[in-house]
Image: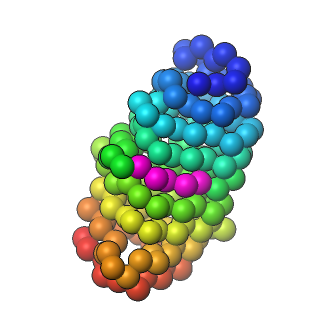
Amino acid sequence: MFDAVVPASTAVGTYPASALAAPALVSGLLTISGATTLSGTGTVDGAGVVSVLGFFTWNGGNAAGTGTLELHGGFSITSNSDISISSRVIQNYGLGNWIAGRLVGGSGAVIQNLLGGTMILTNYECSVALVNEGTLVHNRSSSPVILSGSFINRGLFTTNSAIQF
């Protein structure tokens, strides 16, 4: 649900948003200026770029298509079910906290923690490629980091538990 009505086929421009609860098909650049939530059965889809400038809360829904989801204002992932990334690229530029939820994806799906970005992993299982160029912290000693996709570390990665590939 957008605060402004955005037809799915023409989701291009800058919009304030409180939630993405319905499918949004993005073909160009969609900039969301405020805090945003992707939940329930919401889907971000298409070959375009979705740039979220405010805080992004991801507690359900999916990211599909071949485009990019840019998270500039920080994020939180908390989901009791699998979140599908399909073949989308997720880019973190800020402080992200991955509290719960398993990310599953298809070929081409990548999570990039970019230079200057920090991701804190509390309960982490991921079957998509993970590329770290910033700071990646796993802070839960009672559970391993489970990576069934590829992992490329070009930044700082700290953990106090096992890494399971």
Residue 130 location, x and y as percent? Answer: 41, 61
In the image, which residues are magenta? 75-79
Question: Residue placed at 66% from the left, 34% from the top?
Answer: 18
- Residue in the picture at 59% in, 54% down: 75
Task: Tell me where residue 155 appears, x and y as whole percent.
Answer: 54, 76
Observer-nearest of 48 and 145 = 145
In-front residue for pair 27/147: 147
Query: Up-down: is 128 above or below 139?
Result: above
Q: Which residue is located at x 60 percent, y 33 percent?
A: 19
Q: Main secondary structure of the magenta part?
A: strand
- Asked if one can make out residue 154 in the rendered structure from this viewpoint, the answer is no
Residue at the image position 59 percent from the left and 25 percent from the top: 1
In screen coordinates, is 67 left or right of 144?
right
Q: Quadrant of residue 11?
A: top right
Left-right relation of 26 to 29? left
| Residue 84 highlighted magenta (yes or no) | no
In the rendered view, would you say 17 is above or below 133?
above
Q: Residue 116's spot in the image, x, y percent?
A: 66, 68
User: Which x, y percent locates residue 162?
Assistant: 30, 81
